[in-house]
Structure formats: C-alpha cells, structure tokens
C-alpha cells in the first residue's frame, strides 16, 4: 500500500514559522513588534486569509467523503485518488491554503519586514513538504498519480483555473 508519511525535521521548522506568522500573531499580540497597518493591505490580507482558510478546511470534509476513507480513520487516509473539486484545480489544496492564510496574509495584515523574512523560508519548507508528499503519493497510486501530476499544478491556483477554463470551453 506504500509508505506512511513520517514527519521530517523540516516539518517542525515549518510549523514553528507558521505559528510565528499566523494572523493572530503572537509577536503582534504581545506587542513585541508594532506594524503600521494599511487599509488596502488589510483588506487584501483578509481576502487571502479567507481563501486560504477555505482551502485549509476543505480537505477535512472533501477527502473524507470522496477518498474512500475507512470509518474511524483520518481524512488523510484515502484509499482512492481524489481528483475532483478543488483537487481538479490544484493537487495540494491544504498546502496552498496554508501559504495563502499564513505566509501571504500575515505580511498584508501586519506590514512588517519580519513577516516577509519569516514567510520566505516558510513557503520554501511547505514546497519541500509537498514535494515529499508527491513522492509518497506516486508510491501509493503509481502511474495514476503521475498522470494527475502532469495535468494538475501543485499549488498554482491561477494556472489550474486557466487549465480548467480551457478544458471546459474546448
């Protein structure tokens, strides 16, 4: 059935960066830094955070209902490859949501250089995480997953939506 996902030390570094960059930010709440807000950036931050949170929560429900998950098992324990819904636009829905809701939204909500500095390695670590996950999913689903990878981008929502639009209009 393939390997199960084992946590890598880079995952823990990514989680730490996520905590430091989370929109309900401990650095801001504890007044360790005082960013200077901007209404336009704040609105954009709320939009990115909202979209990101939808993408973070979506797999909890969708994978469980479409992925042939055994009763009592977590949503990540799918027994069939899910390629519909948001998964027809991007392969790594939850990773994309994390990037948008944490590493993109936070610097917009709290304009301060520290969130950009922390966000860059955070996004890189998420990238490394989904590359590891791709390898595990290739082991689990084989050529079916490779074909899916060829068709659907990993996290590029715009490319995925354009591909879907072209697919539906041709």
Image (tube, rainbow, N blue to C red):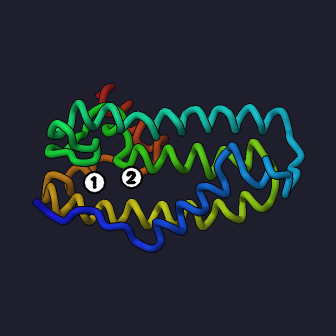
Can you identify the residue that label 1 sits on? 149
Q: Which is more toward the observer, 166 or 152?
A: 152
Residue at point 58%, 32% (across, down):
50
Foreground residue, 5 or 114?
A: 5
Q: Residue furthest top?
A: 169
**Contact flag, marks 1 and 2 (Cβ < 8 Å):** yes
Where does residue 109 sit, x and y in percent of width and height? Answer: 75, 42
Task: State whether residue 77 is above or below residue 49.
Answer: below
| Quadrant position of residue 24 | top right
How many residues crowd around disc 2 within 10 Å: few (fewer than 14), some, or many (20 or more)?
A: many
- Using the image as rendered, state which of residue 161 and residue 116 is in the foreground: 116
Crowding at mark 1 (Cα within 10 Å: few <14, some 14-19, many 20+): some
| Extreme residue in the left direction | 1
The image quadrant of residue 116 is bottom right
The location of residue 55, given as percent across then percent down, is 46, 37
Q: Nearer the viewer, residue 19 or 109?
A: 19
* Residue in the picture at 25% in, 39% down: 83
**67 horizontally vs 166: left or right:** left
Q: Compared with residue 30, is residue 87 higher up or lower down, i.e. above or below? A: above
Label 2: state its secondary structure: loop
Instruction: Name the residue rendered at 38%, 49% in the picture.
Output: 92
Q: Earlier in the sequence, mark 1 or mark 2?
A: 1
Residue appearing at x 35%, y 37% in the figure: 60
Place of residue 125 in the rendered image (x, y in percent of width and height, measured from the top left):
50, 66
- Residue 54, x across and y down, in percent: 49, 33
Residue at the limit of the structure toward the bottom, as seen here:
9
């Amino acid at each position: 059935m393939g390997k199960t996902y084992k946590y890598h030390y880079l995952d823990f570094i990514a989680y730490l960066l996520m905590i430091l960059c989370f929109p309900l930010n401990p650095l801001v709440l504890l007044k360790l830094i005082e960013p200077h807000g901007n209404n336009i950036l704040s609105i954009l931050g709320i939009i990115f955070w909202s979209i990101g949170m939808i993408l973070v929560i979506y797999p909890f429900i969708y994978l469980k209902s479409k992925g042939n998950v055994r009763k009592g098992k977590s949503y990540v324990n799918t027994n069939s490859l899910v390629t519909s819904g948001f998964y027809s636009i991007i392969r790594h829905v939850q990773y994309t949501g994390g990037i948008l809701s944490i590493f993109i939204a936070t610097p917009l909500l709290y304009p301060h250089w520290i969130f950009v500095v922390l966000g860059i390695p955070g996004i890189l670590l998420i990238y490394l995480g989904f590359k590891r996950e791709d390898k595990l999913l290739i082991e689990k689903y084989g050529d079916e997953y490779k074909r899916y990878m060829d068709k659907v981008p990993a996290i590029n929502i715009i490319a995925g939506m354009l591909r879907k639009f072209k697919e539906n209009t041709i």
